[in-house]
Image (cartoon, coloured by chain):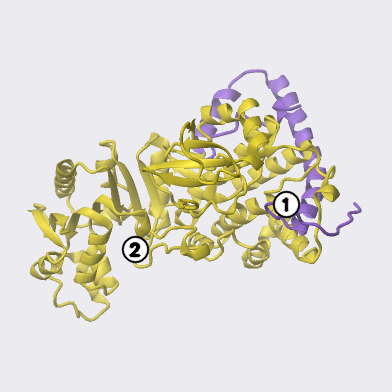
Protein backbone atom coordinates (compact mmCIF):
# COMPACT_ATOMS: atom_id res chain seq x y z
CA UNK A 1 0.00 0.00 0.00
CA UNK A 2 2.66 2.50 0.97
CA UNK A 3 4.96 1.09 -1.67
CA UNK A 4 6.78 3.57 -3.81
CA UNK A 5 5.62 6.53 -1.85
CA UNK A 6 8.96 7.97 -2.73
CA UNK A 7 8.43 7.48 -6.40
CA UNK A 8 12.03 8.23 -7.25
CA UNK A 9 13.28 4.87 -6.00
CA UNK A 10 11.04 2.46 -7.88
CA UNK A 11 13.58 1.58 -10.56
CA UNK A 12 16.09 0.07 -8.17
CA UNK A 13 15.67 -3.69 -7.62
CA UNK A 14 17.88 -3.52 -4.50
CA UNK A 15 15.19 -1.95 -2.35
CA UNK A 16 12.88 1.03 -2.04
CA UNK A 17 11.83 3.84 0.24
CA UNK A 18 8.57 3.93 2.12
CA UNK A 19 6.91 6.17 4.61
CA UNK A 20 5.16 5.06 7.78
CA UNK A 21 3.83 7.11 10.67
CA UNK A 22 5.98 10.06 9.74
CA UNK A 23 9.17 7.99 9.45
CA UNK A 24 11.09 7.36 6.28
CA UNK A 25 12.33 3.79 5.86
CA UNK A 26 14.17 1.86 3.22
CA UNK A 27 13.48 -1.80 2.58
CA UNK A 28 16.57 -3.75 1.56
CA UNK A 29 15.62 -6.64 -0.70
CA UNK A 30 16.92 -10.22 -0.45
CA UNK A 31 18.47 -9.82 -3.90
CA UNK A 32 20.77 -7.13 -2.48
CA UNK A 33 21.56 -9.00 0.76
CA UNK A 34 25.15 -10.05 0.05
CA UNK A 35 26.07 -6.56 -1.20
CA UNK A 36 24.49 -4.89 1.82
CA UNK A 37 26.26 -7.19 4.27
CA UNK A 38 29.54 -6.72 2.42
CA UNK A 39 29.18 -2.95 2.62
CA UNK A 40 28.83 -3.17 6.41
CA UNK A 41 31.41 -5.95 6.98
CA UNK A 42 34.09 -4.47 4.72
CA UNK A 43 34.06 -1.25 6.72
CA UNK A 44 32.94 0.75 3.67
CA UNK A 45 29.80 2.04 5.37
CA UNK A 46 31.69 3.22 8.46
CA UNK A 47 34.38 4.85 6.34
CA UNK A 48 31.76 6.72 4.30
CA UNK A 49 29.84 7.84 7.38
CA UNK A 50 33.05 9.03 9.04
CA UNK A 51 33.79 11.18 5.99
CA UNK A 52 30.16 12.35 5.78
CA UNK A 53 29.95 10.91 2.28
CA UNK A 54 26.79 8.92 2.94
CA UNK A 55 23.67 9.60 4.95
CA UNK A 56 23.77 7.47 8.13
CA UNK A 57 21.01 4.99 8.85
CA UNK A 58 19.66 3.11 11.85
CA UNK A 59 18.74 -0.55 11.90
CA UNK A 60 15.07 -0.89 12.62
CA UNK A 61 13.25 -3.73 14.36
CA UNK A 62 9.55 -4.37 14.39
CA UNK A 63 8.54 -2.48 11.28
CA UNK A 64 6.44 -4.66 8.99
CA UNK A 65 7.94 -5.16 5.59
CA UNK A 66 5.81 -3.52 2.93
CA UNK A 67 6.85 -6.31 0.59
CA UNK A 68 7.69 -9.33 2.81
CA UNK A 69 8.47 -11.71 -0.06
CA UNK A 70 11.45 -9.76 -1.29
CA UNK A 71 12.51 -8.21 2.04
CA UNK A 72 15.83 -8.72 3.76
CA UNK A 73 15.75 -5.88 6.29
CA UNK A 74 14.52 -2.38 6.94
CA UNK A 75 16.75 0.59 7.72
CA UNK A 76 15.87 4.13 8.69
CA UNK A 77 18.08 6.69 6.93
CA UNK A 78 18.65 10.10 8.46
CA UNK A 79 16.19 12.60 7.01
CA UNK A 80 17.54 15.16 4.57
CA UNK A 81 15.85 18.52 5.15
CA UNK A 82 14.99 19.21 1.53
CA UNK A 83 15.47 17.24 -1.66
CA UNK A 84 16.87 19.51 -4.34
CA UNK A 85 17.61 18.58 -7.94
CA UNK A 86 20.65 19.13 -10.17
CA UNK A 87 18.77 21.62 -12.36
CA UNK A 88 18.38 23.75 -9.24
CA UNK A 89 22.10 23.83 -8.50
CA UNK A 90 24.67 26.37 -9.55
CA UNK A 91 27.81 25.31 -11.40
CA UNK A 92 29.90 25.00 -8.24
CA UNK A 93 27.24 22.88 -6.59
CA UNK A 94 27.06 20.43 -9.48
CA UNK A 95 30.85 20.36 -9.54
CA UNK A 96 30.95 19.60 -5.82
CA UNK A 97 28.43 16.78 -6.27
CA UNK A 98 30.50 15.41 -9.20
CA UNK A 99 33.73 15.34 -7.22
CA UNK A 100 31.94 13.73 -4.29
CA UNK A 101 30.58 11.03 -6.60
CA UNK A 102 34.09 10.26 -7.86
CA UNK A 103 35.35 10.21 -4.31
CA UNK A 104 32.61 7.74 -3.36
CA UNK A 105 33.65 5.53 -6.26
CA UNK A 106 37.31 5.59 -5.14
CA UNK A 107 36.58 4.86 -1.49
CA UNK A 108 34.28 2.02 -2.56
CA UNK A 109 37.02 0.48 -4.73
CA UNK A 110 39.41 0.67 -1.80
CA UNK A 111 36.93 -1.52 0.09
CA UNK A 112 36.31 -3.98 -2.72
CA UNK A 113 33.04 -2.47 -3.88
CA UNK A 114 31.94 -0.40 -6.84
CA UNK A 115 29.50 2.49 -7.13
CA UNK A 116 26.75 1.10 -9.35
CA UNK A 117 24.88 4.39 -9.82
CA UNK A 118 26.38 7.78 -10.58
CA UNK A 119 23.09 9.64 -10.60
CA UNK A 120 23.28 13.29 -9.61
CA UNK A 121 19.88 12.81 -7.97
CA UNK A 122 21.48 10.52 -5.40
CA UNK A 123 23.47 13.39 -3.92
CA UNK A 124 22.16 16.08 -1.64
CA UNK A 125 23.76 19.05 0.05
CA UNK A 126 23.04 18.06 3.63
CA UNK A 127 24.29 20.01 6.64
CA UNK A 128 27.02 21.68 4.66
CA UNK A 129 28.29 18.55 2.86
CA UNK A 130 27.56 16.70 -0.33
CA UNK A 131 26.17 13.37 0.78
CA UNK A 132 25.00 10.19 -0.95
CA UNK A 133 21.39 9.52 0.05
CA UNK A 134 20.97 6.12 -1.59
CA UNK A 135 22.51 3.57 0.78
CA UNK A 136 22.04 0.80 -1.78
CA UNK A 137 24.38 2.24 -4.39
CA UNK A 138 27.26 -0.20 -4.00
CA UNK A 139 27.95 -3.66 -5.36
CA UNK A 140 30.74 -6.11 -4.69
CA UNK A 141 33.50 -5.33 -7.17
CA UNK A 142 34.34 -8.06 -9.65
CA UNK A 143 37.88 -7.65 -10.95
CA UNK A 144 37.98 -7.04 -14.67
CA UNK A 145 34.52 -5.53 -15.09
CA UNK A 146 34.13 -1.98 -16.40
CA UNK A 147 32.46 0.76 -14.33
CA UNK A 148 28.79 0.28 -15.03
CA UNK A 149 27.96 3.91 -14.12
CA UNK A 150 30.54 5.55 -16.40
CA UNK A 151 27.99 6.64 -18.97
CA UNK A 152 25.66 7.93 -16.26
CA UNK A 153 28.44 9.96 -14.67
CA UNK A 154 29.26 11.57 -18.01
CA UNK A 155 25.59 12.37 -18.70
CA UNK A 156 24.63 13.59 -15.24
CA UNK A 157 27.74 15.55 -14.39
CA UNK A 158 30.39 15.97 -17.04
CA UNK A 159 28.14 17.01 -19.93
CA UNK A 160 26.20 19.73 -18.04
CA UNK A 161 29.35 21.00 -16.33
CA UNK A 162 31.18 21.27 -19.64
CA UNK A 163 28.23 23.00 -21.28
CA UNK A 164 28.03 25.50 -18.42
CA UNK A 165 31.77 26.11 -18.49
CA UNK A 166 32.05 26.50 -22.26
CA UNK A 167 28.64 27.93 -23.16
CA UNK A 168 26.39 29.39 -20.48
CA UNK A 169 25.50 28.57 -16.89
CA UNK A 170 21.81 28.60 -17.72
CA UNK A 171 22.30 25.51 -19.87
CA UNK A 172 22.03 23.56 -16.62
CA UNK A 173 18.27 23.86 -17.02
CA UNK A 174 18.59 21.30 -19.83
CA UNK A 175 18.79 18.69 -17.09
CA UNK A 176 15.09 19.33 -16.58
CA UNK A 177 14.42 18.03 -20.08
CA UNK A 178 16.61 14.95 -19.87
CA UNK A 179 15.91 13.17 -16.63
CA UNK A 180 18.76 10.69 -17.04
CA UNK A 181 21.32 13.33 -17.87
CA UNK A 182 22.21 15.11 -21.09
CA UNK A 183 22.75 12.66 -23.97
CA UNK A 184 26.42 12.74 -24.90
CA UNK A 185 25.78 13.08 -28.61
CA UNK A 186 23.75 16.19 -27.90
CA UNK A 187 26.38 17.61 -25.55
CA UNK A 188 29.13 16.93 -28.09
CA UNK A 189 27.19 18.80 -30.73
CA UNK A 190 26.55 21.81 -28.52
CA UNK A 191 30.08 22.16 -27.15
CA UNK A 192 32.45 24.41 -29.10
CA UNK A 193 35.05 22.63 -31.25
CA UNK A 194 37.86 23.85 -28.99
CA UNK A 195 36.69 21.39 -26.32
CA UNK A 196 38.26 18.71 -28.52
CA UNK A 197 41.69 19.88 -27.44
CA UNK A 198 40.75 19.32 -23.80
CA UNK A 199 41.88 15.71 -23.29
CA UNK A 200 39.15 14.85 -20.77
CA UNK A 201 36.31 16.33 -22.82
CA UNK A 202 37.70 14.83 -26.02
CA UNK A 203 37.70 11.33 -24.57
CA UNK A 204 34.81 11.28 -22.07
CA UNK A 205 32.37 13.29 -24.19
CA UNK A 206 33.35 13.52 -27.86
CA UNK A 207 34.87 10.09 -28.41
CA UNK A 208 32.46 8.56 -25.93
CA UNK A 209 29.52 9.94 -27.91
CA UNK A 210 31.03 8.66 -31.16
CA UNK A 211 31.56 5.23 -29.69
CA UNK A 212 27.95 5.14 -28.47
CA UNK A 213 26.72 6.01 -31.93
CA UNK A 214 28.94 3.50 -33.65
CA UNK A 215 27.93 0.59 -31.42
CA UNK A 216 24.32 1.69 -30.93
CA UNK A 217 22.86 -1.42 -32.51
CA UNK A 218 25.03 -3.94 -30.69
CA UNK A 219 24.47 -5.46 -27.28
CA UNK A 220 27.10 -6.73 -24.95
CA UNK A 221 27.03 -9.23 -22.08
CA UNK A 222 28.83 -9.22 -18.77
CA UNK A 223 30.93 -12.20 -19.88
CA UNK A 224 32.14 -10.39 -22.95
CA UNK A 225 33.38 -7.34 -21.09
CA UNK A 226 34.85 -9.20 -18.14
CA UNK A 227 38.60 -8.99 -17.88
CA UNK A 228 38.78 -6.00 -20.19
CA UNK A 229 39.16 -3.27 -17.55
CA UNK A 230 41.70 -3.75 -14.76
CA UNK A 231 41.33 -2.19 -11.34
CA UNK A 232 44.28 0.02 -12.15
CA UNK A 233 42.41 1.05 -15.29
CA UNK A 234 39.39 2.01 -13.20
CA UNK A 235 41.56 4.14 -10.95
CA UNK A 236 42.98 5.77 -14.06
CA UNK A 237 39.49 6.41 -15.39
CA UNK A 238 38.29 7.95 -12.10
CA UNK A 239 41.44 10.05 -11.85
CA UNK A 240 40.97 11.30 -15.39
CA UNK A 241 37.31 12.19 -14.76
CA UNK A 242 38.32 14.02 -11.61
CA UNK A 243 40.98 16.03 -13.43
CA UNK A 244 38.50 16.85 -16.17
CA UNK A 245 35.88 18.08 -13.68
CA UNK A 246 38.47 20.05 -11.74
CA UNK A 247 39.61 21.70 -14.94
CA UNK A 248 36.17 23.21 -15.59
CA UNK A 249 35.22 26.61 -14.23
CA UNK A 250 32.84 29.51 -14.79
CA UNK A 251 33.17 33.19 -14.06
CA UNK A 252 31.35 34.17 -10.93
CA UNK A 253 30.33 37.61 -9.81
CA UNK A 254 29.66 39.36 -13.07
CA UNK A 255 25.98 38.68 -13.26
CA UNK A 256 22.98 40.96 -13.08
CA UNK A 257 22.35 40.60 -9.37
CA UNK A 258 25.72 39.86 -7.91
CA UNK A 259 26.35 43.54 -7.22
CA UNK A 260 22.81 44.20 -6.15
CA UNK A 261 23.50 45.27 -2.60
CA UNK A 262 25.97 47.83 -3.85
CA UNK A 263 23.27 49.70 -5.72
CA UNK A 264 20.01 49.35 -3.83
CA UNK A 265 17.85 52.07 -2.45
CA UNK A 266 18.97 51.46 1.05
CA UNK A 267 21.40 53.52 2.96
CA UNK A 268 23.61 51.46 5.26
CA UNK A 269 21.39 52.57 8.12
CA UNK A 270 18.12 51.61 6.48
CA UNK A 271 19.66 48.27 5.47
CA UNK A 272 20.49 47.49 9.11
CA UNK A 273 17.03 48.64 10.13
CA UNK A 274 15.42 46.33 7.58
CA UNK A 275 17.51 43.46 8.92
CA UNK A 276 16.41 44.20 12.49
CA UNK A 277 12.74 44.23 11.50
CA UNK A 278 12.98 40.97 9.53
CA UNK A 279 14.91 39.36 12.37
CA UNK A 280 12.26 40.38 14.88
CA UNK A 281 9.52 38.97 12.63
CA UNK A 282 11.39 35.65 12.42
CA UNK A 283 11.72 35.56 16.21
CA UNK A 284 8.04 36.17 16.53
CA UNK A 285 7.06 33.28 14.21
CA UNK A 286 9.79 30.86 15.41
CA UNK A 287 9.51 28.78 12.22
CA UNK A 288 10.97 25.29 11.83
CA UNK A 289 12.11 26.10 8.32
CA UNK A 290 12.24 29.11 6.02
CA UNK A 291 12.22 29.71 2.29
CA UNK A 292 13.77 32.98 1.23
CA UNK A 293 12.37 33.69 -2.24
CA UNK A 294 14.52 36.04 -4.29
CA UNK A 295 17.34 35.68 -1.78
CA UNK A 296 20.16 37.04 -3.92
CA UNK A 297 23.39 36.12 -2.10
CA UNK A 298 21.53 35.22 1.07
CA UNK A 299 22.07 38.30 3.21
CA UNK A 300 18.59 38.04 4.75
CA UNK A 301 18.44 34.23 4.59
CA UNK A 302 21.21 34.23 7.17
CA UNK A 303 19.01 36.08 9.63
CA UNK A 304 17.06 32.83 9.80
CA UNK A 305 19.81 30.24 9.24
CA UNK A 306 22.03 31.78 11.89
CA UNK A 307 19.25 31.22 14.39
CA UNK A 308 19.60 27.50 13.65
CA UNK A 309 16.60 27.41 11.29
CA UNK A 310 16.99 25.37 8.12
CA UNK A 311 16.68 27.95 5.35
CA UNK A 312 16.63 27.72 1.57
CA UNK A 313 17.83 30.77 -0.34
CA UNK A 314 16.24 30.69 -3.80
CA UNK A 315 17.36 33.02 -6.53
CA UNK A 316 16.97 33.12 -10.29
CA UNK A 317 20.56 34.23 -10.85
CA UNK A 318 23.15 31.42 -10.88
CA UNK A 319 25.88 33.96 -10.14
CA UNK A 320 24.21 35.10 -6.92
CA UNK A 321 23.57 31.49 -5.94
CA UNK A 322 27.22 30.64 -6.58
CA UNK A 323 28.40 33.49 -4.37
CA UNK A 324 26.02 32.39 -1.66
CA UNK A 325 27.25 28.80 -1.95
CA UNK A 326 30.89 29.87 -1.73
CA UNK A 327 30.10 31.65 1.52
CA UNK A 328 28.23 28.61 2.86
CA UNK A 329 31.25 26.41 2.14
CA UNK A 330 33.84 28.85 3.42
CA UNK A 331 32.01 29.51 6.67
CA UNK A 332 30.92 25.89 7.05
CA UNK A 333 27.29 26.94 7.41
CA UNK A 334 25.00 23.99 8.03
CA UNK A 335 21.50 25.41 7.84
CA UNK A 336 21.57 27.23 4.55
CA UNK A 337 20.90 25.76 1.12
CA UNK A 338 21.26 28.13 -1.88
CA UNK A 339 19.30 27.07 -4.97
CA UNK A 340 18.63 28.43 -8.44
CA UNK A 341 14.92 28.95 -9.00
CA UNK A 342 12.91 31.07 -11.39
CA UNK A 343 9.71 31.78 -9.48
CA UNK A 344 7.90 32.78 -12.65
CA UNK A 345 8.52 29.24 -13.89
CA UNK A 346 9.43 27.07 -10.90
CA UNK A 347 10.54 23.42 -11.06
CA UNK A 348 7.66 21.22 -12.21
CA UNK A 349 6.91 17.60 -11.34
CA UNK A 350 9.00 15.46 -13.70
CA UNK A 351 9.57 11.92 -14.80
CA UNK A 352 7.27 8.93 -14.64
CA UNK A 353 3.75 10.06 -13.72
CA UNK A 354 5.16 13.52 -13.01
CA UNK A 355 6.25 12.04 -9.71
CA UNK A 356 9.92 11.11 -9.89
CA UNK A 357 11.05 14.67 -9.24
CA UNK A 358 8.70 16.84 -7.25
CA UNK A 359 7.60 20.31 -8.15
CA UNK A 360 8.72 23.15 -5.91
CA UNK A 361 5.26 23.49 -4.42
CA UNK A 362 4.98 19.78 -3.71
CA UNK A 363 8.10 20.15 -1.57
CA UNK A 364 6.36 22.79 0.57
CA UNK A 365 4.62 24.37 2.29
CA UNK A 366 6.92 25.91 4.88
CA UNK A 367 6.11 27.76 8.10
CA UNK A 368 7.69 30.99 6.91
CA UNK A 369 8.47 32.59 3.56
CA UNK A 370 10.57 35.72 3.14
CA UNK A 371 9.72 37.76 0.04
CA UNK A 372 11.95 40.81 0.26
CA UNK A 373 12.41 43.20 -2.62
CA UNK A 374 10.67 40.66 -4.78
CA UNK A 375 7.12 41.63 -5.51
CA UNK A 376 7.80 44.50 -7.89
CA UNK A 377 9.68 42.06 -10.11
CA UNK A 378 6.79 39.62 -10.11
CA UNK A 379 4.02 42.22 -10.40
CA UNK A 380 5.60 44.71 -12.78
CA UNK A 381 8.31 42.93 -14.80
CA UNK A 382 6.32 39.76 -15.01
CA UNK A 383 2.71 41.06 -15.02
CA UNK A 384 1.49 38.77 -12.25
CA UNK A 385 -1.58 40.39 -10.63
CA UNK A 386 -1.21 41.04 -6.90
CA UNK A 387 -4.09 38.68 -6.13
CA UNK A 388 -2.30 35.86 -7.94
CA UNK A 389 0.85 36.58 -5.97
CA UNK A 390 -1.06 36.50 -2.70
CA UNK A 391 -2.67 33.22 -3.70
CA UNK A 392 0.70 31.69 -4.54
CA UNK A 393 2.27 32.74 -1.24
CA UNK A 394 -0.72 31.43 0.71
CA UNK A 395 -0.11 28.03 -0.88
CA UNK A 396 3.56 27.81 0.05
CA UNK A 397 3.62 29.20 3.59
CA UNK A 398 1.84 29.75 6.85
CA UNK A 399 3.53 33.05 7.69
CA UNK A 400 4.85 35.56 5.21
CA UNK A 401 7.32 38.38 5.63
CA UNK A 402 6.87 40.54 2.55
CA UNK A 403 8.27 43.87 1.49
CA UNK A 404 6.14 46.27 -0.49
CA UNK A 405 8.15 48.41 -2.86
CA UNK A 406 6.03 51.43 -3.95
CA UNK A 407 5.94 52.87 -7.44
CA UNK A 408 7.82 55.95 -6.34
CA UNK A 409 10.85 53.76 -5.52
CA UNK A 410 13.61 54.31 -8.06
CA UNK A 411 13.98 50.54 -8.63
CA UNK A 412 10.33 50.37 -9.66
CA UNK A 413 10.73 53.50 -11.74
CA UNK A 414 13.51 51.74 -13.57
CA UNK A 415 11.26 48.77 -14.29
CA UNK A 416 8.53 51.12 -15.52
CA UNK A 417 10.85 53.17 -17.70
CA UNK A 418 10.74 50.80 -20.63
CA UNK A 419 7.04 50.04 -20.50
CA UNK A 420 3.60 51.48 -20.17
CA UNK A 421 2.31 51.80 -16.61
CA UNK A 422 -0.72 49.51 -16.66
CA UNK A 423 -0.49 48.74 -12.97
CA UNK A 424 -3.24 50.82 -11.42
CA UNK A 425 -3.66 48.56 -8.41
CA UNK A 426 0.01 48.67 -7.58
CA UNK A 427 -0.26 50.85 -4.46
CA UNK A 428 -0.18 50.25 -0.73
CA UNK A 429 -3.97 50.04 -0.54
CA UNK A 430 -4.20 47.83 -3.63
CA UNK A 431 -1.48 45.56 -2.25
CA UNK A 432 -3.13 45.24 1.16
CA UNK A 433 -6.56 44.62 -0.34
CA UNK A 434 -5.22 41.85 -2.57
CA UNK A 435 -3.23 40.14 0.17
CA UNK A 436 -5.98 40.40 2.77
CA UNK A 437 -8.03 37.98 0.71
CA UNK A 438 -5.56 35.29 1.69
CA UNK A 439 -3.69 36.67 4.70
CA UNK A 440 -4.31 38.60 7.86
CA UNK A 441 -1.78 41.33 8.50
CA UNK A 442 -0.14 40.85 11.89
CA UNK A 443 2.30 43.71 11.75
CA UNK A 444 3.34 46.44 9.34
CA UNK A 445 6.52 48.47 9.62
CA UNK A 446 7.93 51.20 7.45
CA UNK A 447 11.67 51.05 6.93
CA UNK A 448 12.90 54.45 8.07
CA UNK A 449 14.96 56.20 5.45
CA UNK A 450 13.21 54.42 2.56
CA UNK A 451 9.75 54.28 1.06
CA UNK A 452 9.41 50.58 1.56
CA UNK A 453 7.13 48.76 4.00
CA UNK A 454 7.61 45.36 5.64
CA UNK A 455 4.65 43.19 6.55
CA UNK A 456 4.27 40.11 8.69
CA UNK A 457 1.21 38.17 7.58
CA UNK A 458 -0.50 34.94 8.48
CA UNK A 459 -2.35 32.76 5.99
CA UNK A 460 -6.09 32.56 6.54
CA UNK A 461 -7.06 28.89 6.77
CA UNK B 1 41.92 -4.24 -29.49
CA UNK B 2 39.53 -6.81 -30.83
CA UNK B 3 36.17 -6.78 -29.15
CA UNK B 4 33.40 -9.19 -29.88
CA UNK B 5 30.03 -7.72 -29.19
CA UNK B 6 26.81 -9.66 -29.26
CA UNK B 7 23.57 -10.10 -27.36
CA UNK B 8 22.37 -10.08 -23.78
CA UNK B 9 22.38 -6.65 -22.20
CA UNK B 10 21.47 -7.94 -18.76
CA UNK B 11 22.75 -5.34 -16.38
CA UNK B 12 20.49 -3.23 -14.19
CA UNK B 13 21.81 0.06 -15.46
CA UNK B 14 22.42 -0.54 -19.14
CA UNK B 15 25.56 1.43 -19.82
CA UNK B 16 25.37 1.02 -23.57
CA UNK B 17 27.79 -0.92 -25.63
CA UNK B 18 29.61 2.13 -26.90
CA UNK B 19 30.17 3.36 -23.35
CA UNK B 20 31.77 0.04 -22.44
CA UNK B 21 34.00 -0.04 -25.47
CA UNK B 22 35.36 3.47 -25.07
CA UNK B 23 35.87 2.73 -21.39
CA UNK B 24 37.94 -0.38 -22.18
CA UNK B 25 40.15 1.58 -24.51
CA UNK B 26 40.53 4.52 -22.10
CA UNK B 27 41.09 2.36 -19.04
CA UNK B 28 43.98 0.66 -20.85
CA UNK B 29 46.15 3.73 -21.11
CA UNK B 30 44.69 5.77 -18.24
CA UNK B 31 45.62 2.90 -15.93
CA UNK B 32 49.21 3.19 -17.09
CA UNK B 33 49.06 6.97 -16.84
CA UNK B 34 47.86 6.92 -13.26
CA UNK B 35 50.57 4.41 -12.30
CA UNK B 36 53.23 6.63 -13.86
CA UNK B 37 51.74 9.62 -12.03
CA UNK B 38 51.87 7.85 -8.68
CA UNK B 39 55.54 6.90 -9.12
CA UNK B 40 56.35 10.37 -10.31
CA UNK B 41 54.68 11.82 -7.19
CA UNK B 42 56.68 9.41 -5.04
CA UNK B 43 59.92 10.49 -6.68
CA UNK B 44 59.01 14.17 -6.26
CA UNK B 45 57.97 13.57 -2.66
CA UNK B 46 61.26 11.77 -2.00
CA UNK B 47 63.28 14.65 -3.41
CA UNK B 48 61.19 17.33 -1.71
CA UNK B 49 60.81 15.38 1.56
CA UNK B 50 58.51 17.26 3.89
CA UNK B 51 59.06 20.96 3.38
CA UNK B 52 55.90 23.03 2.94
CA UNK B 53 54.03 20.89 0.45
CA UNK B 54 51.53 19.54 2.89
CA UNK B 55 50.28 22.88 4.21
CA UNK B 56 50.02 24.17 0.70
CA UNK B 57 48.00 21.16 -0.38
CA UNK B 58 45.64 21.68 2.52
CA UNK B 59 45.11 25.31 1.59
CA UNK B 60 44.53 24.37 -2.05
CA UNK B 61 41.88 21.92 -0.97
CA UNK B 62 40.13 24.53 1.13
CA UNK B 63 40.03 26.86 -1.84
CA UNK B 64 38.30 24.34 -4.04
CA UNK B 65 34.73 24.58 -3.00
CA UNK B 66 33.21 21.19 -3.46
CA UNK B 67 36.64 19.77 -4.24
CA UNK B 68 37.79 19.66 -0.65
CA UNK B 69 38.57 15.98 -0.86
CA UNK B 70 41.35 13.78 -1.91
CA UNK B 71 43.08 12.32 1.02
CA UNK B 72 41.97 9.07 -0.57
CA UNK B 73 44.06 8.60 -3.64
CA UNK B 74 44.76 5.51 -5.73
CA UNK B 75 48.27 5.15 -4.35
CA UNK B 76 46.86 3.56 -1.23
CA UNK B 77 46.08 0.61 -3.42
CA UNK B 78 49.44 -0.03 -4.88
The residue closer to the viewer here, A454 or A435, is: A435
Q: Nearer the viewer's eye, disc 1 or disc 2?
A: 1
Q: Residues within 10 Å of mark 2 (few under 14, many from 20)?
A: some
Chain containing the residue with disc 2? A
Assign a secondary structure to mark 2: loop
Q: CA distance from mark 1 to mark 2?
A: 40 Å
- Residue A343 is marked as 2
Q: Which quadrant is the C terminus of chain A positioned in?
A: bottom left
- Residue closest to the far top: B50
Is A6 placed above or below A308 here? below
Residue A337: image quadrant is top left
Assign a secondary structure to mark 1: loop
- Residue B11 is marked as 1
- Residue B16 image point, x, y percent: 74, 58
Q: Residue at x 89, y 56 (%)?
A: B4
Q: Colour of chain B?
A: purple
- Residue A188 image point, x, y percent: 67, 64
- Residue A368 is marked as none
The residue closer to the viewer here, A383 or A164, is: A383
Is B40 placed above or below B23 here? above
Q: Residues within 10 Å of mark 1 (few under 14, many from 20)?
A: few
Chain containing the residue with disc 1? B
The residue closer to the viewer here, A31 or A301, is: A31
Q: Which chain is yellow?
A: A
Is A33 placed above or below A184 here? above
A353 with respect to A360 (left or right): right
- Residue A305 image point, x, y percent: 29, 40
Q: Residue at x 70, y 55 (%)?
A: B14
Is A211 placed above or below A20 here? below
Q: Residue at x 50, y 32 (%)?
A: A52
The residue closer to the viewer here, A23 or A355, is: A23
Amino acid sequence: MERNLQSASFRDPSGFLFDRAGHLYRQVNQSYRKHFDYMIDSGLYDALVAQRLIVPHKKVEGVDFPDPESAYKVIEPEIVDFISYPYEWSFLQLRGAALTTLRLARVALDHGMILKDASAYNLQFHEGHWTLIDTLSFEIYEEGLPWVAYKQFCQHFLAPLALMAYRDQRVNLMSRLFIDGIPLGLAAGLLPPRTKVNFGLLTHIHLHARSQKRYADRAVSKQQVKGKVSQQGLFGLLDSLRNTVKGLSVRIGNTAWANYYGETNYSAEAFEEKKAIVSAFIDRVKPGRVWDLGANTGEFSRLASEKGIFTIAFDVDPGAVSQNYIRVRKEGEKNLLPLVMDLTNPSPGLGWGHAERESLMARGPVPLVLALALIHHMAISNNVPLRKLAEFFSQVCEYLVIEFVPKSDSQVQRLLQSREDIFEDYSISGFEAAFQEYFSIIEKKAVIGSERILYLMETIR
Amino acid sequence: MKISVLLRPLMYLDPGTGSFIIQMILAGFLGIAVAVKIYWKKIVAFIKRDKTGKVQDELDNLDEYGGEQDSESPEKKG
